[in-house]
Image (cartoon, helix red, strand yellow):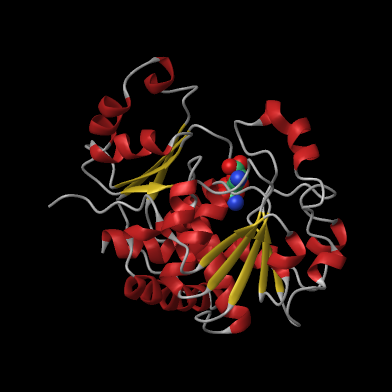
Amino acid sequence: MAARHFLTLTDLTPAELATLMARAAELKAAHRRGERATPYAGKVLAMLFEKSSTRTRASFEAAWTHLGGHTMFLSPRDIQLGRGETVEDSARVLSRMVDVLVVRTFSHERLELFAAHSAVPVINALTDRFHPCQLLADILTWIERHGDVRGRSAAFVGDGNNVCQSWMEAARLFGFNLRVAAPAGYQPEAALQAAYTDCVQVLDDPPAAVAGADAVITDVWASMGQEDEAAARVQAFAGFQVNAPLLAQAAPGAIFMHCLPAHRGEEVSADVIDGPQSVVWDEAENRLHAQKALLELLLG
Ligand code: CP
Ligand code: NVA
């Protein structure tokens, strides 16, 4: 049987995502009680990361260790992929040795190529287009604060790339509405905008996007691989900072989310990210619990 991959959020059905959220909450409660089950004893999870990571790497390593397994971290600096061995050959070889592969890379096509040649499940740990594991934790966090998110509204303010585009997919799959505020030239891909008109509106006006929203989300202005554009992006995103006056436009009790790492004074003001509406530390912790539930779903 072909391996089941998780490359975008749409690889899971709404029913599977609902089950995953409930299971993640159970696993979080069990973790809090100090309970440990080790169903993956003797199994290996490999992480192949071509970009830096704190949360994704640490949460997968901790999750798999809690579940009894062994993890292997593979950097392109150390493996032959970094010296020109092909993606296809790397996937064929590694997937004969390990039980699941977690891959962070640049182009989404590179991840798809890797998955196409892997005999075991491949999990997207971030590409330039999507960050589905982040959304599992984000929606779990939103549910913890507001209950069912169906029919609610979220506003994403900032760069319309990977995290934003996974939020767009989440809107359809979880049944909420998303307004995106991004400057021209930094908006989500046109094809995705066209595919999500029923649940996503893309604007260039942060207060209009945030008005009445239950959750306000942002992300860095210069993503990994865009370091050379950082100064130009600070200019382009002027007026797109999530700060106290902007968050005041949201619904009473609205939460602020950020995948992290954050740049205080750029995409978010310090008083917002460190303030009472911010749930960013729960969001980071929930990577652990949501990914355990994902691993169970993919591996059984
Ligand atoms: N949010 C997130 O994916 O963080 P890392 O880049 O630290 O993994
Ligand atoms: N948009 C960011 C997300 C990091 C988790 C990046 O791609 O660098």
Residue 32 at x, y percent in the picture = 56, 75
Q: Position of residue 100 (x, y in %)?
A: 32, 47
Q: Is residue 65 visible?
A: no
To which quarter of the image does residue 291 belong? bottom left
At which x and y percent is residue 56?
Answer: 53, 49
Q: Quadrant of residue 153?
A: bottom right
Q: Residue furthest left?
A: 1
* Residue drawn at the location 38% of the way across and 19% of the way down: 80
Viewer-side residue, 296 vs 194: 194
Q: In the image shown, does 284 or 61 lie closer to the viewer?
A: 284
Q: Quadrant of the C terminus?
A: bottom left
Is 31 above or below relative to 68? below
Residue 11 vs residue 90, the one in the foreground: 11
Callout count? 0
Q: Is residue 243 left or right of residue 51?
A: right
> Residue, x 57% and y 79% (percent of image)?
152
- Classify residue 186 as left or right of residue 4: right
The single residue placed furthest to the top in the displayed view is 83
Residue in the picture at 79% in, 39% down: 234
Against 6, is 139 above or below? below
The percent coordinates of residue 25 (x first, y second) are 49, 77
Please say whether residue 190 is visible from this viewpoint.
yes
Seen in the picture, residue 254 relative to 274 is either above or below; the reply is below
